[in-house]
Image: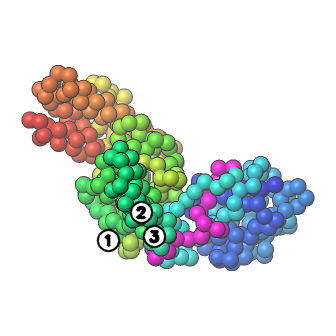
Amino acid sequence: MPFSLKIDAGAYAGRRYVFDQAEVSLGRTQENDVVVPDDGASRQHAKITQSGEGWQIEDLRSSNGTRVNGEPLKRPLALREGDLIKIGDVTFKFAEQKQAPNQTRIVAVGDLPQWDRPSTALARSGGGGALAAAGPAGALAARGRAGAAAKASAKPPMPKQLRLALIGGGAVLGIIVLALAAQKLASSGRNHQVAVDQEFDLGQKPDGHTYGQGPDVDVPSPARAVFVFNFSELVPGKSLLTFHCNTDGVAKPEDIEVRLNGHHLGYLPATFGDSRPVDWLLDRHMLLVNAENRIEFVNLRHPPADWEAFDLWIEQESLPSGTPDQLRIEAQSEYDLAEGRFNSENVAAGNLHEAMLHYRRARLVLAAMPVPPAALESLVTERLHEAQNKLDHRCHAMLFTAQQALATKGVDDALDVWRDILNYFPTDDHPCNERAHKAIQQYE
């Protein structure tokens, strides 16, 4: 019976791989079936073998050992549904499968140069709906190989015989054939564009472009887009980085994965017909200091699903200084101010926006603490997410109202709504402010 390993924690968390073979090896080097992307893994760390109708795991005298459900693995152990296998800082969740999919391989990011990291040509395998790297045994697609694959898979141009048929055939038939040929050529051109890895600079201000696949895209990148930025800081450990973007055209959650230097960062949310802002606080352990960092958007659907990403930028904030007690007091004060504004959001138009800013300041102060209070950190994270969601919904509702007013009542009524938006979003910390300003400039 096949089994699956889902990365429950560590690099590539959330991914699931399915195997249908008698033995699966796990370790740090490339000859293993599961290449564990962690320095705590030995070259040949452990193996999973078939035992009767089930599976067992055995540690191969690794340097740091293997743990199953938190216990050190001292002898071969039969695996059960839901068992957690920890190698270094990577935790796998074991599960049995009912169908036999294609064999796959996990690739360790740290062992490969940047351009040879796992490609975005991901496909659903035949069994269990597991995600598998495209090609035999999860083969990689580097820039050169990706370009070659594009040429091999691209549809050929319209042959000479077809052109002659159009000339000699009837007008209706000619139009139909020409339309079909044009559609194929357009499809071929699109596939060729995205087969080669594309890298774009990511700065501290949006570049005005829209990436992905959709009606508003001006930089086509349906399957994959990579954004490169440099991270440096004057005082090590004293910066907080946030990645901001807006997204649209995403039909289903988990269609588009976002990665930071090969690590799973999250997924673009479903947008339900309207754009949504997305912000990610970048984990310092995933960042490369004084070096190039890469944020990747990877389309997990095949053929590629529509998605659009725009207003992409990196925000770098300096962490405040102070003793742990001073920082704790400041963080609590910012949280209390945020709570006051949040709980009186209907008293004044800008209260919810101000609450968001205080929650963000509290988060920044907590990030400066060596060991932040867990309870307060959890509250700040939860309430900041709640405030941002409320602001997003308010922004969408007011922009929709403005568009309705423009279509049914006229420009003056729409301008009133856009001006009112500025009362609720008084600064450019939320993109609704900029959208309202642009609309006012356009119609005033």
- The answer to whether marks 1 and 2 mark residues whose Cβ atoms lie closer than 8 Å is no
Q: Kindly state the secondary structure of the residue where label 2 is placed.
A: helix
Q: Is residue 129 magenta?
A: yes
Instruction: Point out residue 74 in the picture as x, y percentages from the top left corner.
Output: 83, 67
Count numbered badges in the picture. Answer: 3
Q: Earlier in the sequence, mark 1 or mark 2?
A: 2
The crowd level at tag 3 (other Cα within 10 Å; few <14, some 14-19, many 20+) is some
Query: Residue at position x 20%, y 38% from top?
Result: 436
Asked if residue 91 lies left or right of residue 165, the reply is right
The residue nearer to you, when weighing 32 against 390, is 32
In the picture of the structure, the residue carrying the numbered disc 3 is 151
Dot 1: within a 10 Å radius of its alpha carbon, few (fewer than 14), some, or many (20 or more) residues?
A: few
The residues colored magenta run 128-145
Examine the image and state in which quarter residue 222 appears: bottom left
Q: Which residue is mark 2?
A: 161
**Quarter of the N terminus within the rendering:** bottom right
Residue linked to disc 1:
234
How many angstroms separate mark 1 from mark 2 (CA)?
66 Å
Pinpoint residue 196: horizontal percent, then vertical percent: 42, 68
Marked residue nearer the N-terminal end (3 or 2)? 3
Kind of element beneath mark 1: loop
- Is 234 drawn above or below residue 129 in the view shown? below
